[in-house]
Amino acid sequence: MATTHRAPASSPRAAGLILPATMIALAIVLAAANLRWPLEDFVEYWSAGRLNAAGANPYDAAAVLREQVAIGWTDPEPIMMYNPPWTLALAMPIGAVEFRLARSIWLPLELFLALWCASRLWLLYGGAPERVTRAWFVALLWTPTMLALRFGQLSPFMLFGLVGFLWCVRRDREFAAGAFLSLTAVKPQLVALVWVAFALWALADRRWKALAGAATCIAIASLAALATNPRVFAQYVDLMSSAPPTLAFESPNIATVLRVFSRSRGSWPQYIPTALGTVAVTWLWYRQRKAWDWQRHLPGLVILSCLLTSYGGWAFDLVILLVPIVALAALVSRADRRSLALAAGAALLAVSALSFVMHARRVPQAAFLWMTPAVAIAWWTMGRRRATVD
């Protein structure tokens, strides 16, 4: 009888350590190389965290500009952080170290988060474990991933929150699931409809641990920001009321189009899509409340949230669309239909290539409005051609 050779029991654990070990090594190499990092979006988090840790106003343009000029910023206007104060719990640690070291750590950390999320999504949706590197390839091929890494944006943390939430829900770890979802509160408007569904699910099914996990983490992060700067929430309100980002920027979403065409001087038209989306999600949840399945519904909710967000949705934000993209890639691989796999691959390449060319040519960000609808069309049309999500 032939002998069956099995891998040692420690193999999966050892394999799981390769990715973080590689990222740590990369951080050490980058820090030792003493690179001259470009001053892009990461600067806003670094300077805001630095100011708040010192008890200063992280939402004051003049103070932020001084911090940014000190590291070589040459524009007359600073890059402001419009994220809520609990985001400073992430920003203060990176602001506590010298800029180049902070950037050298931030890039490998976000790369690790993106690849970890891709691999977990692949496994959650039935992709073969031995082919998990395909999920990494998909994640890195998606142009928003590379833009988020280049700019040092927070969107990989949001992706981590969404995937961690789903991973924990599948294992009935409700407190941890809520804690993971709290990470998406750094840009709550971008995933507002996910939060609507979460609230309905948690309240109706009495998932108090999930609610407690989200509330506890947001509260701890808020207290961390308040500990060094007791007025930080009032300072945030002052910024958002005096210079709301909904009016300062024309973000690539339906909400901005609605405001521009309405010719309103206020930003209220931008909240209409999210309000309508809230009604739609509430209706969807009510119809399927008895058989609500986060694994089935999360990809669509992420797409719908990005479509109907009141603000944001820039190309680097759309890294969270890896939730439906990698899920679709795993499901297509399970279907074992070559024509469907080729169609899905071609769609991903087309969207990524066009968005990359647009970015390289410095096309205004408002022109990226088409990206989320393109993913939505791919998700729903290809989803109809394969088996329902398990």
Image: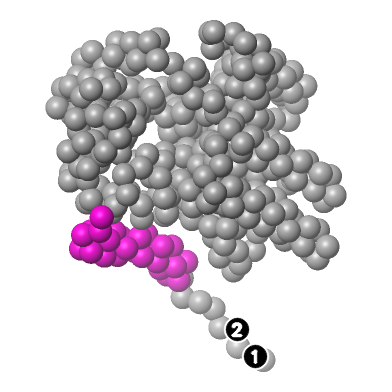
| Stretch of the chain drawn in magenta | 10-36
- Judged left or right of residue 55, residue 104 is right
Residue drawn at point x = 21 percent, y = 59 percent:
34
Q: Is residue 21 magenta?
A: yes
Residue drawn at point x = 60 percent, y = 88 percent:
3
Numbered tag placed on residue 2 in the rendering: 1
Q: Is residue 238 above or below residue 37?
A: above
Secondary structure character of the magenta stretch overall: helix
Which percent across, then down, holds residue 65?
24, 29
Which percent across, then down, holds residue 205?
61, 21
Secondary-structure class at tag 1: loop
Which percent across, then down, holds residue 116?
48, 54
Q: Which colour scheme is used?
A: one colour
Crowdedness of circle 1 by 10 Å Cα count: few (<14), some, many (20+)?
few
Farthest residue in the left direction?
Answer: 54
Q: Name the residue under label 2.
A: 4
Secondary-structure class at tag 2: loop
Residue drawn at point x = 29 percent, y = 65 percent:
25
Q: Which amino acid does label 2 sit on?
A: Thr
Q: Does the magenta stretch include residue 133?
A: no
